[in-house]
Amino acid sequence: MRTQLSNDQIQDGIGKIVDKLYKRLNQKGYGTFSSRHEILGVITEEYKEFIDAVHSKDRENIKEEIMDLAVGAIFGLVCLDENTVEW
């Protein structure tokens, strides 16, 4: 049986992603993605970096790349929800 996580542990992980999202927004601004292809490009690049981190076996880098993937996905979702992306 797999180890079970608590709601507090899940909330801690979500909090780290939210912190990373706002850090990134402060760095790069709140300008939206321009197209679904840009969303794909960002997530694909972050996924490639995640693969490299996994192969490097660097736990902290793996965690950073997972957060970067989540940030790209969240921002892409918001852009889609707000209809700011060209089709």
Image (spheres, grey):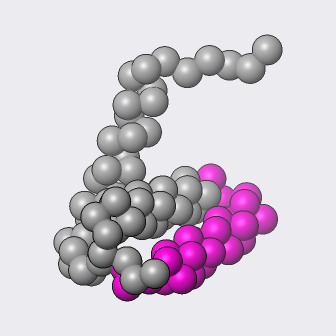
Above or below residue 8? Residue 74 is below
Q: Is residue 69 left or right of residue 27?
A: right
The image quadrant that residue 21 belongs to is: bottom left
- Quadrant of the drawing holding the N terminus: top right
Q: Residue at x 39, y 22 (%)?
A: 8
* Observer able to see residue 27: no
Q: Residue at x 52, y 62 (%)?
A: 69
Above or below residue 8? Residue 14 is below
Residue 54 coordinates in the image, percent (x, y):
72, 60
What span is colored magenta in the figure?
33-60
The image quadrant that residue 49 belongs to is: bottom right
Residue 37 coordinates in the image, percent (x, y):
54, 83
Q: Residue furthest top?
A: 1
Residue 77 coordinates in the image, percent (x, y):
41, 60
Confirm whether the magenta stretch covers residue 1.
no
Residue 87 coordinates in the image, percent (x, y):
46, 81
Q: Nearer the viewer, residue 37 or 47?
A: 37
The image quadrant that residue 20 belongs to is: bottom left
Q: Nearer the viewer, residue 60 or 74?
A: 74
Q: Nearer the viewer, residue 58 or 23?
A: 23
Q: Residue furthest front?
A: 87
Q: Residue at x 62, y 53 (%)?
A: 59
* Observer able to see residue 52: yes
Give the dominant element type of the magenta stretch: helix, strand or loop. helix
Q: Is residue 47 left or right of residue 70?
A: right
Q: Residue at x 25, y 61 (%)?
A: 22
Q: How many marks?
A: 0
Q: Is residue 58 left or right of residue 38?
A: right
Confirm whether the magenta stretch covers residue 47.
yes
